Amino acid sequence: MAFWLAGARSGQDHDWIQRFDPRFWTVDFPRPMLAAVTVPAADALRVDLTFLTAGDLAGLIWDSADRHDHPLLAYATDRDYARTTLSFRWRAGGIVPLDQAHGPTLTIEGRDGAGAARTWYVRLWNYVVAGQPDDARIVLPFSALQAGWSRGEAVDPAAIDRLFVSLVPPGYAAGSTALLPDPVEGWAELSEIRCDGARAMLEIGDVVVPPHGVACATAYDDQGTLTPQRVLRNAEGLGYRGSLLHYVGMSHFMRLAGAEGAVLVDPHGPVLAGPAAAWHAAFLAEARRRGFAPILSLSFELLAQHCPVAWQQRAADGSPARTGWSPPSALLSPAQPEAMAWLRRVAAAFAGLMREAGLAVRVQIGEPWWWVDAARRPCLYDAAARARLGGNPPVIDDLAAPLDAARLDLLDRAGAILAEATAGLRDAVRAAVAPDPAEVLLLVFLPTVFDPATPAAPRANVPLGWAAPAYDRLQVEDYDWLTSGADGPRAAARAAITARLGYPLAQQDVLAGFVTVPGDLVAWRRIDAALDEAAGEGGHERFVWALPQVCRDGYVRLPAPSEEDSMQAFDDVSFPLALGREAVVSPEFATSVIVTASGFERRNALWSDARLRFDLGPGIRSAAEIGTLLTFFRARHGAARGFRLRDPTDFSSNGLTGTPTAGDQWLGTGDGAATRFALVKRYGAADGDPQVRRITRPVAGSVRVSLAGAVRTTGWSLEPGGTIRFAAPPPSGAEVRAGFLFDVPVRFAEDRLDIAGYGCDAAEAVSVPVIALREEG
């Protein structure tokens, strides 16, 4: 399906918002403290805070440039605040009040009249017009603001990059990492927010992409500093509807406390941090208002610095399991009773939030597994796991090495422990909302659990205890393979998990993503194609993982063409007349040529491939041929529908018109993973820099394939769009070559066809121009 990476709005719909609209503020804070911003009313925002150290400081931020929304939904950049006034009612608790040292301060970052970077600190207490330190009316006229404890330094309002309000705990000590005796819960609320003056409004993107049948994933770790309204506005505006998969994360949702000389999750108190609970309650309420059906996702990952030592999975040498994220996360041991009890309470708490929001309870257990480290060592040797596995289980130093019966049995028993742990989570969710129903889904990351190099891994990480109908639905993702083009392992793993667990495709969801390198067009193209592929398989739902990357790169999934729009279609039929000698064939390129003042040229090739134009009129003479042409022209609705045309000057992979052989054209080299190879034809290969032409309309039955020099008549198929797909990935280093005949996809260039003298033998079509179509295979 068509998609677009939008860099900026260009004529799309827009609207206007008041500057300082509560939905578009953000928060920022250092670890280990926590903060979240929500929007309790159209003119109000609230920040909830948990302070853990004496040096904790949170910032409530307004950015002059929108750095978070999708380009088609972002507000316009305006750094000029001259003659603009912001006013609001301030209420707060659990933080240093307005009138004290370190009280809430407006930090303004920008540039002065000379263009030098400047930061001004404006004491909010100086601009209170009525009220008390914890309940006040504040008016900020930007053209008259002065920084400093007692004012005195004028703020230049003409070039402000961002501003933020600082929020600190009682007893604040700048730079201190000393733990507070107990966590301090604080809050601040701005209500009756009003912006007046010359630049009080901002233009904002207001596109509404029609629903396209694909769902979206969000993530609290990445988007929890935004308001829930802002997150969901992007999802809805981009055409996502229905299910909304929300990962609660591994770093910001949990209640923390000082323990063991560190800040760790509190295994006995409330499991959700106050800010996270407030944010998710608001998120779920807004999701319901917009018609979404959220699925809350909970994993076995926990930010390593907050994970109790005894809870962590370990390799046989005692080294802890660590992901590749920065900072890294630890993996909870499925065998650790206290860790699993805590995780069950987390699952029940989130299920309770969903029920309180009036939503159907839907929870995903995300990527539960025994970690396999970079050395391919399974991390199933923590103290709790050792005890469950007999006290002194055999060591597996390399999961890729041949394993004896004892070690295979060890993996089976580890799998049983994992299945027991996930079943406990499932049952905790259902018990928390009984007698109401709950839908529990299981997500499996295929590249790890079905790594071809570790064929025994599914024994531990895809236990048979997960087999249908243990969970309401199976969800799968394979983004490492997907974005690298490893189609062979992808297909094999999907077949393997379907066979092992028995969930039919109608009970499987597919997650496609994610893009680690900003703007990676190839990765997005593969993700978009995978969504189409999943639709063709008849799966239950398809998700894009995830909204932060969608917004960052401007990904727009376009809806399928309606019946009315199908006039853009291609009819896979050939032009019914043979081209005569007088037909005209014209390949054309597009080149930008700039002549400098000294007469030198600078040339830039705008197209990588030629576009062909034909005139089929010369040579069509008889009334019968004219009749055939008229019928064909009408059936194509003029220029509306494409068709095949044989170029009499160039229709073979062997030279221009020779008989194809299996070694004619080099398509690529095997890497042991890729199974798809696009048909191409190279021109000027002897010159060292060939022009590569994509062949999307090969002639059925003409394709010949060779692999490492050997002709292959089986083990491959020809996909629509001119792509060879192998049943098994060609081995690394093996050359893939092919020969073929091909047609050119074209359309009539005009909606009018001029015929002269029809009805007599001298009839002729004066001109029948057609033009080649660009196609993506």
Image (cartoon, rainbow, N blue to C red):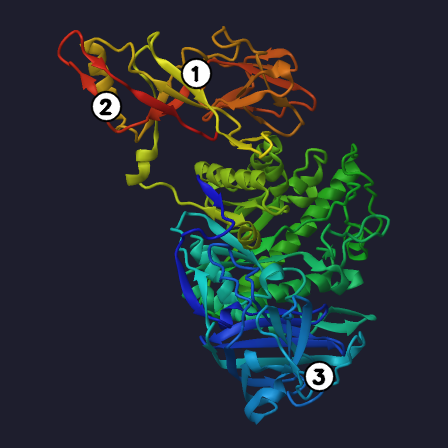
| Outermost left residue | 759
Q: Within 10 Å of the Cα at label 3, are there few (<14), some (14-19), or many (20+) other Cα atoms?
A: many
According to the picture, the residue beneath numbered tag 3 turns out to be 102
According to the picture, the residue beneath numbered tag 2 turns out to be 753
- Looking at the image, which residue is at 66% across and 86% down? 151
Indicate which disc residue 699 carries: 1
Q: Is residue 160 or residue 232 the one in the foreground? A: 160
- Looking at the image, which residue is at 67% across and 65% down? 342
| Outermost right residue | 317
Q: Is residue 468 or residue 360 the one in the foreground? A: 360
Q: Residue 63 appears in which quarter of the rendering?
A: bottom right
User: Which x, y percent locates residue 460?
Assistant: 70, 44
Q: Is residue 538 or residue 157 the one in the foreground? A: 157
Query: Which numbered disc, 2 or 3, marks the residue that appears first in the sequence?
Result: 3
Q: Is residue 478 or residue 350 the one in the foreground? A: 478
- Looking at the image, which residue is at 80% across and 74% down? 177
The span from disc 3 to disc 1 (Cα, nearest Å) is 76 Å
User: Which x, y percent locates residue 308?
Assistant: 77, 64
Could you tell me which secondary element the residue under label 3 belongs to?
loop
User: Which x, y percent locates residue 399?
Assistant: 77, 38
Could you tell me which secondary element the residue under label 2 belongs to?
loop
The span from disc 2 to disc 3 (Cα, nearest Å) is 80 Å
